[in-house]
Image (cartoon, coloured by chain):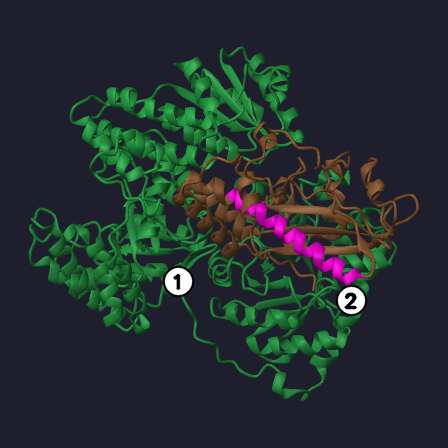
Amino acid sequence: MTEARLTGIDRNETLQYLGWLGSPIPEELAAEISRCENRILETARPRAVWRLFDLLPDGTLASTTFRPEGRDVPALLKDCSQVILMAVTLGGEAERLLLTSQARSMGDAVILDAAAGAAVENVCNNLCCDLEARFSPRFLTDRFSPGYGDFPFSQQRAFFDLLDITRRIGVSLTDSGLMLPQKSVTALLGIAYTPQEHRHRGCASCTLFAGCSFRKEGKHCGSC
Amino acid sequence: MDPAEIILLDGGMGTQLQAAGLPTGQLPELWNLTEPEKVTAVHRRYVEAGSRILYTNTFGVNGLKAARYGHSVSELVEAGVRCARAADRGEGIRVALDIGPLGQILEPLGTLRFEEAYALFREIVVAGRDAGADLIVIETMSDLYEVKAALLAAKENSSLPVWTTMTFEASGRSFVGTTVSAMGLTLSGLGADAIGFNCSLGPKELLPLVCELRRWTDLPLILKPNAGLPDPATGEYRLSAEAFAEELLPALREGVAYLGGCCGTTPEFIRVLRERLAVPGLRVDQAPISNEKPPRSDGVCSATGTAVFDGVRVIGERINPTGKKRFQQALREQDIDYIVARGIEQQDAGADILDVNVGLPGIDEAEMMKRTVKALQAVIDLPLQIDSSNPEAIEAGLRAVNGKAIVNSVNGKEESLRAILPLCRKYGAKVVGLCMDENGIPETWEARAAIAERILNAALAIGMPKEDVLIDCLTLTVSVQQEQAGETLRALRYVRETLGLRTVLGVSNISFGLPARENITVSFLTQALAAGLDLPIVNPNQPAVMDAIAAYRVLAGEDSDSEAYIRRFASREKPASTEKIAGSPAKASGISLTDCILRGLKGETARLTEEALETRGEMAVIDELLIPALDRVGMLYEKQEIFLPQLINAANAACGGFEVIRRRLAQSGSRSVSKGKILLATVYGDIHDIGKNIVRTVLENYGYTVIDLGRDVPAEVVVETAVREDIRLVGLSALMTTTVSSMADTIAALRRSGHDCRIMVGGAVLTPEYALEIGADYYAKDAKQSADIAREVLG
């Protein structure tokens, strides 16, 4: 199964998007965050589209003119003979909720925004898991999005052309390269015959998340 | 309907061109100019397969993309029409100018304005009309507002028939949430000649949507589905031509008149369809048999919400300046947020439709109506009732509205009928007809009913459907003209039962001048409902009024199993919580204003502000209580003892206090309190504005007046506003690296203008160093710091 699935929202990720650094969270605020996460879970209609391409030796995707630029993507794909392009969105309904909530309560709006950010991560993670299963016994690399590392943001356009994203899942790309609905992700990932090294999953998945002194100073501990 | 009347359209174009050698990634419409014979060859194969209407190869052409093409819209369109026309070898083929989505999302989710979209569509329409297209097809749309812009552009700039098809998901909504009922009601009203679905899904999945659409329109239906669902790995569609036809034929029973295919379909699909349609007697069970139409539903709608007219529907009356000083002040200061908040309040109180009246001497009512309609529909799903006596304001509202609206009102005067009804017909709005004319309000019910009939006939004469006429029999004040209450009710019953029209009535007037008004109002309302009132215009914030309506719905059998009634009063059992944050009602004793703000208790902050105002002046309350409380919140935030949601909730609570002060000053006729004006904007090209909105909330609650230009704001608009409003502090936000350059341009433009102001900037990718490098005076790392900067600059 490779449909878009939203199965839950990681509280730590919501808190991280809210800039939380470990201060006490009053009971009523925790309840407010739960309410906001639930509203996102109820409102979002996640959608996904993906497609498989053969990878030519020069790094171009077969039968297209798209060749990811920079050094990071070729390094990621060094063991791969195929590549998947994917796009995921929480949908226009959640986007509208984020917009309307700003007129009702800015406090709820920032929490909803953070929860929606965590939700779209969940949809991406689920899709990648499903793809992992589908392409087993081969292995998938981490996913990599335009704008990460030296993978130029401007190559976003190729994802839209090759996946027909606007027509298939209702996401459009503005002239300045921003996606609408905003809670949308494009990424590529490679398929290899050998196990692939995965990067650290980020601070929100760390056991020291709440009290980390590096994080309080806006730094990382080096393991990510 | 006879199978012979089914007209076959064509199928997929892009994949056919690729099969003919169009390289992946090249824009298909370019071939209209460079390889016209290949485009014509594809059209020709559709004609030979049985297509009688050809869509031109112009789906992606529009002015926004002209640069990518390197050719003008008119060149590409003209060539596209020519290519299709050349495929006609005497078959009498009709050529449809194909118009697709612009590729940019319209306001409010996106930044493309409705008026800009209209202009882009007009350019395509004019080109197609001049090139000799036989009809116009607007297709693959998911945003009803975009369809409206295109449909108006087509109707206003050509006399060709206009078809529109939209794409939906199996859930019955489009990607942006448009419902099938909203599509049917709105597009029928706006004068489309045929409507339906294309793309989206396979025929089987679209069939239930076709049935739903049939309930909301009498227009011929169009169906052009995909060849099933695509294989995710390859993007290829799965249905064979035979299976496609098999799935599509049941749609004929729903009165579909035009059939074709979209993604993944080929001339073979059309050929098989023609064969299946041409064999008499084949699969009679699936042939179009019935001329009986399913029962038609009626109502009004926004793009995402429909008020179905199958019982009492409440029109909320609170967006209206009459007798409300605070509302008048908001209009004069163009404080749209205040107006929108009145809409949200009524939606939460159970209104089904919102009346919108923004008429006030000295303001540009048409412009204000347009802005208000757009702002309301950005955040509220309810249909709107445009309330004005000024035809210009009515048209501005009707044009801006996304959905099917009501116009309040026309009356029996010749002049009124002539000015208002054509607007309602053009924009497909329902109209409220007032039972009065040149001679005022008749005293007998018979004379009022006669005016109602006159209004109905005038509407029918210009082609409005009967169900679009609503009648208001007019409520007079019972303390002045006691016998008139009965006349109103008698007129109402006649209009409902004999004329067969739905009725509207503003009821609050009845009790003017009497003590305990609510008794009279509710009693009259109940009698009017019993006499057949469909659409009471009331203040939904009055619980007694809404209770009476809830009870009526039970007694009239509208509220099945009393479900809504039980739900309404179940929540009444609990003590009413006025605080947003549950579980922490501030006890009247002991808690200070500072604590209330710190805990985000808005209602309690307002109450304590009222109390403080008994002993201190307005400015003293602001400077001695509200601001110090906010400062304490800011300090805790800096020390990381609280985090962002708490900062905002505190600012929001303080807002409760400021609102009390604003209301009091409005009552006494003073100007608003303000510590100075600040202009905020998210720069051109950027649409991520939540950070800017947080800053705005905080600044407003420190007592500053914020002029918020929104997002994607061109540099010249920032400069022009800063100069006009004499702004001394400008705040700019940009989220992405790609848009920081636009921030630098805006700063440069402000400096070039010579206008004396300070500039603060913020956004995820900015650093203090970079902020200075691009010429800003301040870098604000968060909302708290922006308030510190404001204090430094403005005091």
Q: Of the numbered discs in the image, which one, if any, rests on residue B363?
A: none
Residue behind mark 2: B266
The magenta stretch is: A113-136
Residue placed most toward the observer, B452 or A161: A161
Q: Are marks 2 and 1 on the same chain?
A: yes
The local secondary structure at tag 1 comes to: strand
Residue type for callout 2: Thr
Does B584 sit left or right of B783 as displayed?
A: left
Query: In the image, is residue A122 part of the stretch drawn in magenta?
Result: yes
The local secondary structure at tag 2 comes to: loop
Residue placed most toward the observer, B681 or B700: B700
Rendered residue at 34%/39% (across/down) = B339
Q: Which of the chains is green?
A: B
Residue placed most toward the observer, B320 or B731: B731
Dot 1: within a 10 Å radius of its alpha carbon, few (fewer than 14), some, or many (20 or more) residues? Answer: many
Residue placed most toward the observer, B351 or B509: B351
Residue type for callout 1: Gly
Does A36 sit left or right of B49 as displayed?
A: left
User: Can you give x and y, in whole percent of width and height, for residue A180 in the image?
Assistant: 60, 44
User: Can you give x and y, in whole percent of width and height, for residue B70 in the image?
Assistant: 77, 38
The quarter in which the C terminus of chain B is drawn is top left
- Residue B152 appearing in the image: no
Chain A visual colour? brown
Q: Chain of mark 2?
A: B
